[in-house]
Amino acid sequence: QVQLQESGPGLVKPSETLSLTCTVSGVSISSYYWSWIRQPPGKGLEWIGYMFYSGSTNYNPSLKSRVTISVDTSKNQFSLKLRSVTAADTAVYYCARSYGSGSYPFDYWGQGTLVTVSS
Amino acid sequence: QSVLTQPPSVSAAPGQKVTISCSGSSSSIGNDYVSWYQQLPGTAPKLLIYENNKRPSGIPDRFSGSKSGTSATLGITGLQTGDEADYYCGTWDSSLGAGVFGGGTKLTVL
């Protein structure tokens, strides 16, 4: 059974770096594509970016200058770093799996973790 | 402002049918497959439809999807109170080089 679980600080100060980890169980991370998606409170979904286990990545152009997604295959985990955060980055952050890049659907999602940006 | 346009809300009575539209462009819906997600209150989105009209295992055939040109539609028949949720369409936009979603549609089963 495939499961994804996000973890990381729930509170980040403005201008600092948001760091989250997604732990994958039930399947090897060395397959599929792995994404981060966020949802501001009361708003819609925003795709942040994805990575393949080989290390190749693709980021949303609107966030590209501040985002890094990386993988640790030994721990079956992948991570998100979002630099120079502001209140606009407050959101529930989800990790998700897809079979491929592009329009491949997200078939497994983590439960999500709320990150609040505030001093 | 979302790249894909959905109505903010739709409603219908139990047992009835409802459709939710998703409008895009030639570089998004017109150029690639569409997926649909159901988000029950307080939970993560769940894949309902992929490749325009395919249902993952376990999704009842009350849910259907279609695509024509730069628009897609989600249909739900035999509405149940448990279908009350937010529904999102998603695809890839080749012009933006990014995954994109609609703003979401809140379904109310009266």
Image (cartoon, coloured by chain):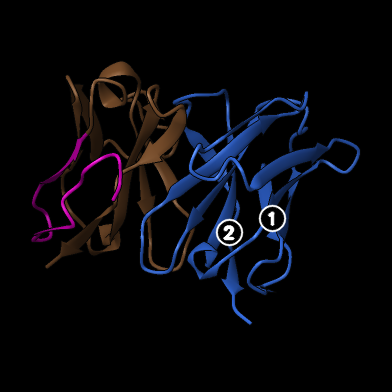
Chain colours: A blue, B brown
Q: Which residue is mark 1?
A: A5
Q: Give the image location of residue A68, x and y in percent.
A: 70, 43
- Residue visible at 71% across and 66% down? A16
Q: Is residue B47 left or right of residue A37?
A: left
Q: Which residue is mark 2?
A: A111
* Residue B14 inside the magenta-drawn segment: yes
The stretch in magenta equals B1-23
Q: Secondary structure at mark 2?
A: loop
Frontmost residue, A30 versus A58: A58
- Residue visible at 57% across and 53% down? A94
- Residue visible at 45% across and 68% down? B42
Q: How many angstroms separate mark 2 from mark 1 (CA)?
A: 7 Å
Q: Is residue B87 left or right of residue B10?
A: right
Screen quadrant of the C terminus of chain A:
bottom right
Is the residue marked by circle 2 packed among few (<14), some (14-19), or many (20+) residues within 10 Å?
some
Quarter residue A50 falls in: top right
Give amino acid for label 2: Gln
- Residue visible at 49% across and 24% down? A102
Quarter residue A113 falls in: bottom right
Frontmost residue, A80 versus A97: A80
